[in-house]
Image (cartoon, grey):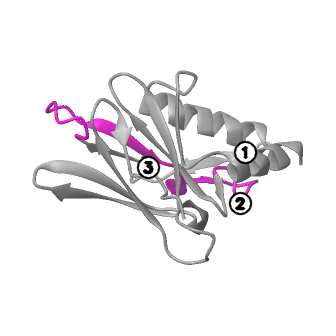
Amino acid sequence: MRTVLVTGLLITFIPYFVSADLLPSSAEEIVQRAKQECDSFDKGRFHATVKAVSQYDFTGDGSAEALVDASQFSCSTAATLWGGSGGTFLWIVAPDKTYEFLAHKWKVVDVDGQNVLLLAVHSSQCSDDVGPCFRAFVWQDGFRTTQRGHE
């Protein structure tokens, strides 16, 4: 029960985008950590679909970065171990660090040869009104996006 409460609090208060050196440095480490979290939660059985890890070149260097989508994880003993009302965790393992996002849905869109990460995020990221909200992230020495304007 405590794990569920802590996870819920993290999902409620985590920003839509986090960059931290403490995050795992490979897609395999992220999936293994998720498996361990599930295993330790009432001895759950972990499953990840083949869509859990995909590859996209965000940096433009010709090498693909791993994108890990926690919406493709499941745990037999927990319904929402990696997500909640704010979205589900999504990680991108770039050359210098791992980036963590929360999103309800995501898509990579090619705009004139530049891969853009489009996230459907919680409406609070756009305004105080309930409704659709999207963020676009593009690589330039790290992920960049527009900031919410001052109203």
Q: How far apart are marks 3 and 2 (CA)?
A: 17 Å
Determine which residue is flagged by label 2: 79
> CB under 8 Å between callouts 3 and 2?
no
Question: Horizontally, is 131 left or right of 25 in the view?
Answer: right
> CB under 8 Å between callouts 1 and 2?
no
Q: Which amino acid does label 3 sit on?
A: Ala
Magenta part of the protein: which range? Answer: 57-82
Q: Which amino acid does label 1 sit on?
A: Leu
Q: Farthest residue toward the left?
A: 112
Q: Is residue 79 above or below residue 28?
A: below
**Within-10-Å neighbours for mark 1: few <14, some 14–19, many 20+:** few
Going 54% across and 65% down the picture, which residue do you hit?
Answer: 151
Question: Horizontally, is 114 left or right of 121 in the view?
Answer: left
Q: Nearer the viewer's eye, disc 1 or disc 2?
A: 1
Q: Is residue 42 visible to the viewer in this orientation of the structure?
A: no
Determine which residue is flagged by label 1: 10
- Going from N to C along the chain, the mark reached first, 3 or 2, is 3
- Going from N to C along the chain, the mark reached first, 1 or 2, is 1
Determine which residue is flagged by label 3: 52
Give the x, y percent position of residue 55.
28, 43
